[in-house]
Amino acid sequence: SARWIGSGRAEAIPPPHGSSGMIDLIVLPLIKIIFVLTGVLITVMYLVLLERKVQAWVQARLGPMRVGPHGVLQPIADVVKLFVKEDVTPVRAEKWVFTLAPIIVLVPSLIAFAVIPFGPEVNLFGRPVPLYITDLNVGLLYIVSVAAIGVYGIILGGWSSNSKYPLLGSLRSSAQLISYELAVTLTFVSVILAAGSLSMVQIVEAQHANGVWFAFVQPVALFIYGVGALAETNRNPFDLPEAESELVAGFHTEYSGMRFALFFLAEYTNMIVVSAVATTLFFGGWLRPFPNVEWLSFLGLVPAWIWFTLKTFALLYVFLWIRATLPRYRYDQLMQLGWKWLIPLAIANIVVTAAVKVILGS
């Protein structure tokens, strides 16, 4: 890297050296990465259990109850089952692509956590440590970019299976992602206009400075993002790529064992990602409710990362609640909703946001 000095020359900035530089550049980021990945994997395990419990409660059942007290060890039993289950590769499948596809789906969902801020800087062992892996000045653009890669794994998984139903599921997924990715990206433009930054950390700080969550400033963008998030994660009522009544299991019909588990892990990890992004963009990230209201200052006793976690889990519960409530859309309804309603609505919201920004700025 370099910096400009008065004469117009670029002068190199020496990198940090010594033990302190090594800790800041290598040790702390590695510890954060390990901590985040471990937390995500454990959360996915018990998110599956929570989903089964919520579905059962909606249907006046109990859900898993036999493995451990009230079924709390059921996720561990599921993991063991997937580890020991036979991993079958179809004879006519493209074997290398068939194996690579679930990895392509999972990796982008994991690396998206690199720019999600779980909290502000905290003082740890006498040094300020931010509760996020990194803060890119284009963090939101980074998330959009890596999220778009996952669909390639779905397409390759369906194609490489050399089977009708997986291919149909992968084609549906690609069309669905294109249709709703555009609407979701346009909602990000509205948030960027409101915050004046692409940095996830600065978006949270902008909500603190304005004294209000962007959910109240951009309710239309929040609605569009919510619908688009359901579609992009292939969740009900937009689970057309894996519709059991039509496509058996869609793009992962031919998968079993650990490769199936990777697809399963990627789906629930993506749910966590979109919920964490919604928390950051619309619900103040790590900020307590009404951060500028003095008489609610006692809420500040709760650590910031706990507020972030509670908001994220509340949004995850909405995912589970919707699955138990709404029926699946027809494919033509899915396309009409994306192209005829959400995209024009997102464009109109950008125009209104920009106009208000100019008027208030002047």
Image: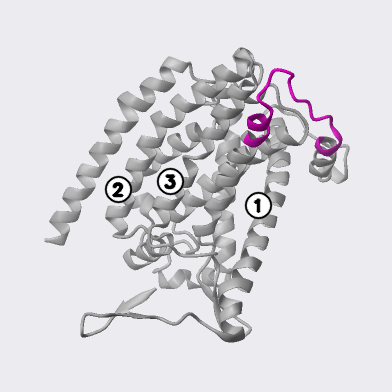
Position in image of residue 49 (x %, y %)? 73, 40
Amino acid type at image mark 3: Val
Compute the Cα span from label 1 to label 3: 20 Å
Dot 2: few (<14), some (14–19), or many (≥20) neighbours within 10 Å? many
Label 2 SS: helix
Name which of mark 2 and mark 1 comes first in the sequence.
Answer: 1
Can I make out residue 47 in this image?
A: yes
In percent of the image, x 55 and y 25: which residue is there? 239
Chain part drawn in magenta: 82-100
Name which of mark 1 and mark 3 comes first in the sequence.
Answer: 1
Dot 1: few (<14), some (14–19), or many (≥20) neighbours within 10 Å? some
Residue sitting nearer the eye, 205 or 184:
184
Residue 40 bears which disc, if any? 1
Residue sitting nearer the eye, 292 or 64:
64
Q: Nearer the viewer, mark 2 or mark 1?
A: 1
Amino acid type at image mark 2: Ser
- Residue 97 shown in magenta: yes
In percent of the image, x 51 and y 45: which residue is there? 274
Pointer 3 residue: 144
In percent of the image, x 21 and y 80: which residue is there? 8
Compute the Cα span from label 2 to label 1: 29 Å
Residue sitting nearer the eye, 361 or 302:
361
Amino acid type at image mark 1: Val
